[in-house]
Amino acid sequence: MEGKYATLKVPYMGYRNILILCQEGNRWTVEICDSGKIIQVYEDEFSIDT
């Protein structure tokens, strides 16, 4: 999944589009598109864009 774009099911500070960077344990490190902020989310908090 690394390098893929996804959509957060619940917006984070108004942002929904993310870029998946890497997996760390049971969480994923992602970058919020447009803001550049790096956060960690669980796999059930986003869906991969097709």
Image: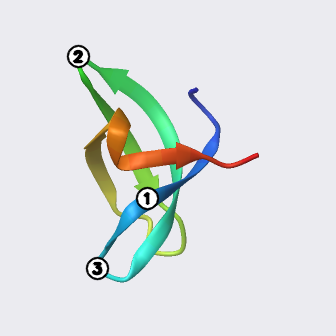
**What whole-number distance in Å separates the C-alpha atoms at marks 2 and 1?**
19 Å
Q: Which residue is mark 2?
A: 25
Which residue is painted at 53% across and 74% down in the image?
34
Q: Residues within 10 Å of mark 3 (few under 14, many from 20)?
A: few
Q: Which residue is mark 1?
A: 8
- Amino acid type, mark 3: Met
Q: Secondary structure at mark 3?
A: loop
Picture coordinates of residue 50, whole percent (x, y): 76, 46
**What whole-number distance in Å separates the C-alpha atoms at marks 2 and 3?**
24 Å
Tally of marks:
3
Q: Residues within 10 Å of mark 2 (few under 14, many from 20)?
A: few
Which residue is painted at 28% across and 44% down in the image?
41
Q: Is residue 33 left or right of residue 37?
A: right
Nearer the observer: mark 3 or 1; the answer is: 1
Q: Secondary structure at mark 2?
A: loop
Picture coordinates of residue 5, whole percent (x, y): 63, 48
Q: Which residue is mark 3?
A: 13
Q: As rendered, which of 27 and 47 lies closer to the eye? A: 47
Nearer the observer: mark 2 or 1; the answer is: 1
